[in-house]
C-alpha cells in the first residue's frame, strides 16, 4: 500500500468513492477540490495497486494552531480491517506534528458506531470531540 498526498486529479475520483460510503457525509466536488488545493500536504490517499483504498482529509486549525482536524476518513469496504485507516491517521498525525500540532480532533456521525469504536481503539478519547 502506498500513501500519498492529494493531486489535482483526485477530487472527482474521491467524490465518487465517498458517495459509496453511506457513513460519510455527502459533499460537493468543490469540497474535495478544496482539500486537494489548499490542504494537500495534510490530506492523503491510500492506494492498493491501481485502486484507491481510502483517503483522509485534514488540516491544521487556523486559530488553535497546535490542533489539527480530520474532516473525513474513508476506507472502501473491500479494504477495511487491514490497517489502512490507521496508517492514514498515522501519516496525518506525523504531518501535523511536524507543523507543531500536539492534538488531533475529529468528529463522526452519532450513529457511526463502527467508526467510533475504531477511533477509541486507536487512542482517541473525549468522545464528544474524539481528541487524541
Image (cartoon, rainbow, N blue to C red):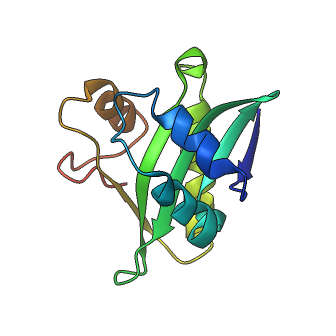
Q: Is residue 132 left or right of residue 129?
A: right
Q: Is residue 48 left or right of residue 28?
A: right
Q: Is residue 78 left or right of residue 118?
A: right
Please tell me whether residue 7 is drawn above or below residue 77 in the rendered image.
Answer: below
Q: Is residue 70 left or right of residue 99?
A: left
* Residue at screen point 42% across, 77% down: 66
Position of the C terminus, as image quadrant, is bottom left
* Residue at screen point 29% across, 49% down: 107
- Quadrant position of residue 123: top left
- Quadrant position of residue 111: top left
Position of the N terminus, as image quadrant, is top right
> Residue 17 location, x and y as percent?
55, 33
> Residue 124 location, x and y as percent?
35, 46
Q: Residue furthest right?
A: 49
Residue nearer the viewer, 44 or 88: 44
* Residue at screen point 63% across, 40% down: 13
Residue nearer the viewer, 119 or 75: 75
Residue nearer the viewer, 68 or 102: 68
> Residue 53 location, x and y as percent?
64, 30
* Residue at screen point 59% across, 28% down: 83
Amino acid at each position: 500500500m502506498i500513501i500519498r498526498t492529494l493531486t489535482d486529479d483526485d477530487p472527482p475520483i474521491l467524490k465518487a468513492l465517498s458517495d459509496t460510503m453511506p457513513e460519510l457525509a455527502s459533499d460537493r466536488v468543490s469540497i474535495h477540490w478544496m482539500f486537494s488545493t489548499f490542504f494537500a500536504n495534510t490530506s492523503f490517499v491510500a492506494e492498493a495497486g491501481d485502486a484507491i483504498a481510502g483517503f483522509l482529509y485534514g488540516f491544521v486549525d487556523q486559530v488553535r494552531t497546535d490542533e489539527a482536524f480530520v474532516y473525513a476518513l474513508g476506507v472502501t469496504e473491500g479494504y477495511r480491517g487491514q490497517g489502512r485507516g490507521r496508517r492514514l491517521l498515522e501519516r496525518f498525525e506525523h504531518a501535523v506534528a511536524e507543523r507543531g500540532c500536539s492534538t488531533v480532533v475529529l468528529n463522526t456521525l452519532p450513529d457511526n458506531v463502527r467508526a467510533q469504536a475504531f477511533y477509541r481503539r486507536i487512542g482517541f478519547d473525549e468522545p464528544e470531540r474524539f481528541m487524541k
